Structure formats: C-alpha cells, structure tokens
Image (spheres, rainbow, N blue to C red):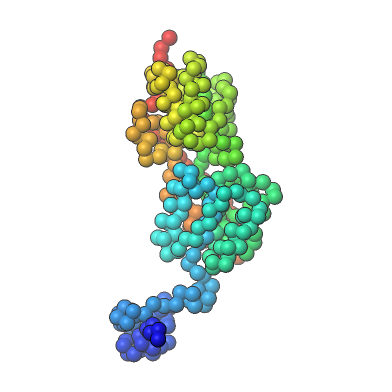
Amino acid sequence: MRRRGPSIADVARLAGVSGQTVSRVANDRPNVDTATRDRVLAAMREVGYRPNSAARALRNGQFRNIGVIVFELSSFGNTRTFNAVGQAATAAGYAINLIPLLDADQGKVTGAFTRLQEQAVDGIIILIEAHQLDEAEIHLPEGLPVVVVDSSAHYDYPIVDTDQAQGARIATEHLLDLGHETVWHLGGPPTSFAATRRRRSWEETLAARGCPVPPLLVGDWSAASGYAVGRQLAADPAVTAVFAANDEMALGLLRALHEEGRDVPGDVSVVGFDDQESSAQFWPPLTTIRQFFPEVGRRAVEALIAELGVEEHHHRPVSVPTELVIRASTAPPRAG
C-alpha cells in the first residue's frame, strides 16, 4: 500500500498548535506571531510536509507561473532575453512555462495561449521578434495579462524593448564622427522588426548629417551571410565604414575583409550590434552596441506582475537604452 504523505494534522500535533494555525502559516497569512510561525515551519521540515501549491493558487487566484511565448529561440537576442526573463521571474518567486513557436501565425499564437491557460499561468510574456506579430490579422486572445517584448505591435498591452533606433544612431554617428564620408549598412532580415528599426535609424542619421545613403545589403543574422555580403563590400574601394546589424554578421564581414586584403580598421572600420560575449575576442576586437538584456527581462517581468489584479491599465512603452562599446575595429579613414 502507498504510504500517505505528512498532513496538516501531523504538523499541528508536532508543533502543538491547531490545524488552522498550520494552514495560516502554509498560506503565508500575517496573523501568526513570529515564535509560533517558526515552530510550525520547523515542524513542517521535520515531518516533510509541503503545502499544496495548487490548492493555494485556487484560493488566492494566483499560480506564481508566467507563460512565455518565443519565436526563434535560437537567435542570440531572443536567447539572452528569455534567459533574462527567467532570472527575473525566479527572483520574483515565479516559475516559467515556455512555448517556442516556429511561425507567428494566428493559429499557432492562439494555440500557445490556450496551452498556457491550461497550464494555469498568471500572465504571458510574448517574445516574437518578427513582423508577423505586428500584422493586423494577428489577434492576441483575451483573458490573461500580456506583456510584449521587442515588437512594433500597437496592442493595448505593455511593450518593453531595447531602444534599437538609439543604438543604430550612435553606431552610425560614431563612424561619421571619426571622419568617414558615409556608412554602409549590413542589415538583418526584413521579417525582423529590430532589423527594420536599425536600418531606418541608420538612414535617418545619414540624412540628418547630409551624407549619402549607400544601397542596403541584407543578411540573415548569421556569420555566413555576413561573409557573403562582406565579399561584395570588400571589393568596393569606396567602402570605408560599415555598420552591421549584429555581431555575428560583423564576424563574417571581418573575415571577408581580411581575405581581400582590406585592413580593419586601417581601410575599413566596422561596428556591430549586441556586444555578445565573444565580440571582444574578434580580430580586431569589435566596436559594437551593447544591449542590456537583463534590464529588458527585469522590466518585462515587472510590467507583467504590475498587470496582475489591476483593473485600470496605463500602458506606456518601456525603452531600454543601449551603449556604444569602442574597441579596435574602428578608426579615422586613411588620409588621402
């Protein structure tokens, strides 16, 4: 026969209190004095009693679980952001239920919501770094608090994101301030809204400074695509400065420039975006834009917790600033 687990009665008997007092302690109610609470907790540990979290959730209306819907978890930005969300949730006493999506279409988004509701989550953080979420036909189901990370979506939900436009602007301005006549851009895929914001900010910064805007060259975030595009850029002697939309593509670009005999930064200066851990180990070490993923994760979790149990919502987008990290891949253009 299966042995029953320890009960409230077992704890009450050992602690010398009523079952109601044990229940108050198990549910973290305030109306128990410190000495009694400590005695009950010690008895719980001794008999191996664990409060029924599911029953507590039904009574309190909160499950201490956060659902996270992620598109392209393999990408550097999404991986770092999800990790930051998980750490912030754990610090706040919440568990994470993850559902990764391959496509951000209506059916899959609705299905993910349904699965998370069945798993008893208090709210959902959506991390879908793609234009599909911003299209009018993508409707987010009602019934749970939602926070959207890294999206242009104009939903009536809190939105938390890195200030992509600011990062692209300071990257472009850094190269122009060094004396380069213009800056070429190795952009990310058109399905990425982050890539679109970086591209637009690059164009606007050049226009504001009265500089020519070179043709856009597009990669897919990978080092291989950066290498392929980099071979085109390396063959053009007019190219003296390149802003790559992420560090991985910048890595491929550096290889292409080296293979074509274009010195970095003597002939071509290169700036990346992300400041991933290996960027300081590139050759030369990469000047890049640092994103503060832990801050994005913390602010997203804070925004979601603030939504729980609130009847009136005031949704102001949260934009986390970036920072230029100057290393050895940028320098003034050669004289003459």
Q: Quadrant of the C terminus?
A: top left
Q: Is residue 335 visible?
A: yes
Residue 171 visible here: no
User: Is 242 located above or below residue 32 in the figure?
Assistant: above
Query: At 49% from the left edge and 65% from the top edge, which residue is drawn?
Result: 65
Q: Quadrant of residue 262?
A: top left
In terms of depth relative to the viewer, which is nearer, 33 or 94?
94
Residue 279 placed where, x, y %?
A: 38, 35
Which residue is drawn at the image coordinates 60% and 48% (left, top)? 103
Circle count: 0
Work out whether 135 lies above or below 108.
above
* Residue 155 percent location from the top left of the image: 63, 52
The answer to whether 212 appears left or right of 250 in the picture is right
Of residues 223 and 209, the one nearer the viewer is: 223
Residue at 35% over, 85% down? 11
Q: Residue at x 62, y 54 (%)?
A: 108
**Outermost residue to the top:** 336
Pick out the residue farthest to the front: 1
Q: In this rendering, would 49 be left or right of 107?
A: left
Instruction: Name the residue furthest right.
Output: 137
As drawn, 122 above or below 186: below
Horizontal side, residue 146 vs residue 90: left or right: right
Foreground residue among 271 and 97: 97
- Report the quarter where the N terminus lies: bottom left
Indicate the position of residue 9 as horizontal and vertical percent values.
Answer: 39, 88
